[in-house]
Image (cartoon, grey):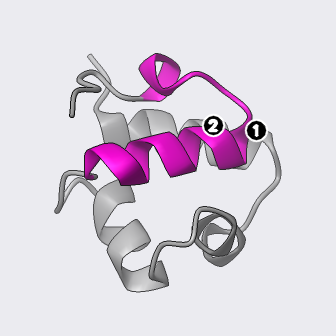
């Protein structure tokens, strides 16, 4: 089973985006984004929505739990 961070990494790489660029598009601090992707921190509800929007996917595609 893949983690949220692994699915986020896969989606980002499929779009050819560097981590800093996705973080900027989602208006998330690059260090925070890196921690989310590595599984060291869980994204907040708003961060999940912003990341999914920046990737052009539904949040449920990447994140196992998307609740406020």
Residue 9 showing in the rendered view: no
Q: Residue at x 48, y 81 (%)?
A: 30
Q: Residue at x 81, y 44 (%)?
A: 15
- Distance between the alpha carbons at the discs numbered 1 and 2: 5 Å
Of 52 and 15, which appears nearest the observer? 52
As displayed, is residue 63 above or below residue 55? above
The N terminus - image quarter: top left
Is 52 inside the magenta-drawn segment?
yes
Count of labels in the image? 2
The disc label shown at residue 42, or none:
none
**Residue found farthest to the front:** 68
Q: Residue at x 36, y 28 (%)?
A: 63
Q: Is residue 53 left or right of residue 38?
A: right
Give percent across and percent down for residue 11: 63, 37
The C terminus - image quarter: top left
As displayed, is residue 64 above or below residue 6? above
Residue pointed to by mark 1: 14
Give percent across and percent down for residue 6: 40, 39
Residue pointed to by mark 2: 11
**Residue found farthest to the right:** 16
Q: Give the residues in magenta.
A: 44-62
Q: Is residue 62 left or right of residue 27?
A: left
Q: Residue at x 45, y 82 (%)?
A: 29
In the rendered image, which quarter is residue 36 located in?
Answer: bottom left
Is 68 inside the magenta-drawn segment?
no
Residue 36 showing in the rendered view: yes
As displayed, is residue 61 above or below residue 50? above
Q: Are marks 1 and 2 in contact (CB under 8 Å)?
A: yes
- Name the secondary structure under disc 1: helix
Give percent across and percent down for residue 52: 57, 38
Give percent across and percent down for residue 67: 22, 27
């Amino acid at each position: 089973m893949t983690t949220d961070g692994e699915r986020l990494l896969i989606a980002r790489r499929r779009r050819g985006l560097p981590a800093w660029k996705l973080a900027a598009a989602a208006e998330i601090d690059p260090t925070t984004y890196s921690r989310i992707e590595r599984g060291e921190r869980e994204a907040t509800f708003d961060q999940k929505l912003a990341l999914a929007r920046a990737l052009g996917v539904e949040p449920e595609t990447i994140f196992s739990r998307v609740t406020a």
